[in-house]
Image (cartoon, rainbow, N blue to C red):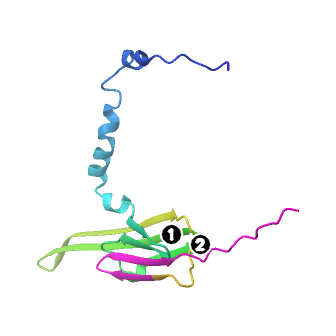
């Protein structure tokens, strides 16, 4: 009770500073232009659909090889990891003028409401989209106690 304060809606207006977060507004924009490696820092974008028996997950993984994707299921937690490799080389008259290499890892982990039956789960990768079909584990019926 000793920490109660009277609310005054005009207090926030009195301290109004329109430029308070001005630097934060452009911080991310500047860093993306400086590093030019923004695609390696982007999270894996996913769509999750649920029906009565399963979840369907679509994960966008453009430029990733099927062999460089790992999916781990543990209870109701799903983890997707992918490694990106890109090599660009520019030649003029047989001589290499520019050579750039990019290696990066993408990682996404999320929790679903129901546990997954990992023995029945399946994965398909086509045109840069990973599709996971994750059947829900059958609910174990709890034992009801009889009160005497």
Q: Is residue 2 left or right of residue 36?
A: right
**Viewer-nearest residue: 6 or 125:** 6
Task: Spot the residue most to the right.
Answer: 148
Q: Identify the residue shown where x is 41% and y is 69%.
A: 49
**Viewer-nearest residue: 103 or 92:** 103
**Is mark 2 in CB contact (under 8 Å) with mark 1?**
yes
Residue at the spot of label 2:
74
The image shows residue 29, relative to residue 63, as above or below, that is above
**Viewer-nearest residue: 87 or 66:** 66
Crowding near the residue tagged with mark 1, few <14, some 14–19, many ≥20 C-alpha atoms within 10 Å: some
Instruction: Return the x and y of residue 76 as percentages of the image width and height.
Output: 57, 68
Task: Spot the residue most to the left.
Answer: 93
Instruction: Return the x and y of residue 29 as percentages of the image width and height.
Output: 28, 46
Name the secondary structure under disc 2.
strand
Name the secondary structure under disc 1.
strand
> Who comes first in sequence, dot 2 or dot 1?
2
Q: Is residue 20 left or right of residue 142?
A: left
Which quadrant would the C terminus be assigned to in this image?
bottom right
Instruction: Return the x and y of residue 91 as percentages of the image width and height.
Output: 16, 75
| Residue 126 among magenta residues | yes
Residue at the spot of label 1:
79
Q: Identify the residue shown where x is 35% and y is 73%.
A: 85
Q: Is residue 88 left or right of residue 144?
A: left
| Residue 132 among magenta residues | yes
Residue 75 figure quarter: bottom right
Which quadrant would the N terminus be assigned to in this image?
top right
Q: Bounds of the magenta span?
A: 123-148
Task: Spot the residue most to the front.
Answer: 148
The answer for how far apart the CA atoms under marks 2 and 1 are is 8 Å
């Amino acid at each position: 009770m000793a920490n109660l304060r009277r609310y005054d809606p005009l207090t926030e207006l009195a301290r109004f500073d329109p430029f308070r977060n001005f630097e934060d507004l452009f911080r991310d924009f500047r860093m993306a232009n400086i590093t030019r490696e923004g695609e390696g820092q982007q999270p894996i974008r996913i769509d999750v659909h649920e029906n009565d028996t399963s979840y369907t997950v679509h994960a966008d993984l453009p430029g990733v090889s099927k062999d460089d994707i790992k999916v781990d299921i543990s209870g109701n937690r799903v983890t997707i990891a992918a490694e990106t490799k890109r090599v660009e080389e520019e030649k003029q008259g047989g001589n290499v003028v520019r050579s750039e290499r990019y290696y990066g890892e993408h990682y996404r982990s999320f929790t679903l409401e129901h546990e997954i039956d990992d023995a029945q789960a399946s994965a398909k990768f086509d045109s840069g989209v990973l599709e996971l079909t994750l059947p829900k584990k059958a609910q174990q019926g709890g034992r009801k106690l009889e009160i005497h």
